[in-house]
Amino acid sequence: MSGQDKPRVNPWIVTCAVMLSTFMEILDTTVVNSSIPHIAGNLSSTVDEGTWVVTSYLVANAIILPMTGWLSNFFGRKRLLLVATAAFTVTSVMCGLATSLEALIGFRVLQGLSGGCMQPLAQAILLETFPPKKHGQAMAAFSLGILLAPIIGPALGGWITDNYTWRWIFYLNVPVGLLSMFMVTNFVFDPDYLARVARKVDGWGIGLLALWIGALQLVLDTGQKHDWFGSNTIRVWAVLCVAGLIAFLVREFTCEDPVVDLRVFLDRTFAAGAFLITIIGFMLYASLVLLPIYLQTLLGYPAFDAGLAISPRGLGALIMMPVCGMLIGKVPSRLLIAIGLVIGGATMFQFARLNLQSGYWDIFWPQVFQGFGMAFLFIPITTMSVSHIAKPKMGNATSIFNLVRNIGGSFGIAIMTTFLSRRSQFHVNRLGENVSIYDFQTQQMFGGLRAFFIARGADAYTAGQRALAAMYGMVQQNAAMKAFIEAFWVMSVLFVSVVPLVFLMTEQHKRKAPAKKPPEPAPPVERPKVPEPAEERELLHV
């Protein structure tokens, strides 16, 4: 269909069409988390084995995501989005029908492969649909889905599992997928420049990409469980990851038609924006994991209530996203990013002030303001990073941009959960040094607890054992609280420390225009020759 034949479609209808499938795909990264014990029990497996339902999806998703730009040039954006949405819908049904853990993991791999295309495709289509001056509004809609879906996921999954069955987590994708396919078919069209061309398949690039990303994801997801590099398995995966990455970089920079065009990093603004979004993904996903752990293990929240307690972050983003989208183009984007980073650091500082007596409102307001900060970060960083990328390269750039954000999130979860575990053990040892039978306060606490259990009907020996266990539980609880405080302090400092990177990015309207060539001098005008008097007499004579 040529550009003249394409109907004019309201950009917001296109936004709804592409964000339906994208929101569904991102939601499935976290919606299963709170249902793992139920899935494992129903399929006669352990909880550790059940975690592969999440890991397999993330690995497959990460492998396909950077290939989206190449695939969209090969098949066309609209066709690829339709196929991906259809495959995601079908594999969701198959996940719900799975009768064994092995089958469920296999279908989750296929689901992750089909869903990985949706995020960069949606971003590229929105940037293509909206004019440059409204890219801020387009990225506001996109970022809202990116932020809300992982926040809603755990609470929604827990509610569905408690009230129905875990299988409905996957069945709910069917009506959303069908509606998305209908809207994409009728309202999304490929631009004229994105004509399908015959391309060589970069088989080596695809293989090396799958090797290093898959190995990296396995290291990050299972490292803490296997004591990181104390495990031979983790060491093997790490070596494969590094070797695969080096070979992949060499291949993609020397290949004529690479599956992932890494030359986009030669643009300084894109490179700085990609690094910033990696750091933001690190802290966003890490805090999404740490807060529910804090709420459940230290404050005693049930899983569903813990999921609801982290929802105010989405409320803050929902309020501020439209405002920030309208500010793009009117306020310098670098200023908006700097404000967002400062807000993010301030909210992490507020989390670092939590304690064992903190109430719901102590957690509510910092999250609302963190949602404000995320709106100031996601929209201008995305808009600025791709503003200098040529339209034919847009799909490739958005694929890489989404990949580094997800990798940052994986690193954030792995590093901060390990940090939390190691620091908790450190503080248990330090606090335990002060709990001595020769200490007067310890003796008083032990005697009081022992008397309490005796009053509840326990004999003297049992009451003494329970008193010791209760005192050790108090030590563990306080040690964990100290570790959480340190983790949030680290993320607060990290937020503020990357502010100078903002100045490496260039505002679109401030980029130097190409030097204009001086106008060439006009050719001399030939005047008609005036005949001399002698020539004039000869002419008259003739």
Image (cartoon, helix red, strand yellow):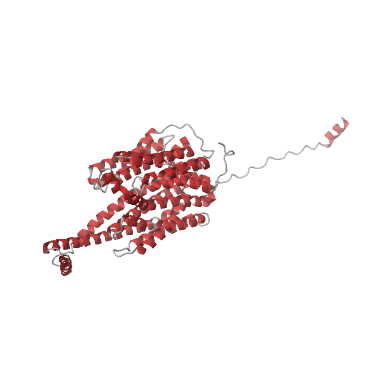
**Which residue is at the front of the view, 221 or 85?**
85
Residue 186: x and y, percent? 52, 41
In the displayed structure, would residue 139 be above or below residue 215?
below
Q: Is residue 246 visible?
A: no
Residue 314: x and y, percent? 41, 56
Question: Which quarter of the rendered picture does the N terminus lie within?
Answer: top right
Q: Is residue 15 visible?
A: yes
Residue 189: x and y, percent? 52, 40
Number of disc labels: 0
At 50% from the left edge and 40% from the top edge, which residue is drawn? Answer: 185
Q: Picture quarter containing residue 461?
A: bottom left
Direction right: furthest residue: 541
Residue 410: x and y, percent? 34, 48
**Which residue is at the front of the view, 239 or 32?**
32
Question: Which quarter of the rendered picture does the C terminus lie within?
Answer: top right
Residue 143 is left or right of residue 286, and the answer is right
**Which residue is at the front of the view, 207 or 166?**
166
Q: Picture quarter containing residue 202?
A: top left
**Which residue is at the front of the view, 1 or 387?**
1
In the displayed structure, would residue 372 be above or below residue 217?
below
In the displayed structure, would residue 248 be above or below residue 478?
above
Q: Picture quarter containing residue 258?
A: top left
Residue 458 is left or right of residue 384, and the answer is left
Direction top: furthest residue: 542
At 29% from the left edge and 48% from the top edge, which residue is drawn? Answer: 38
At 41% from the left edge and 37% from the top edge, which residue is drawn? Answer: 259
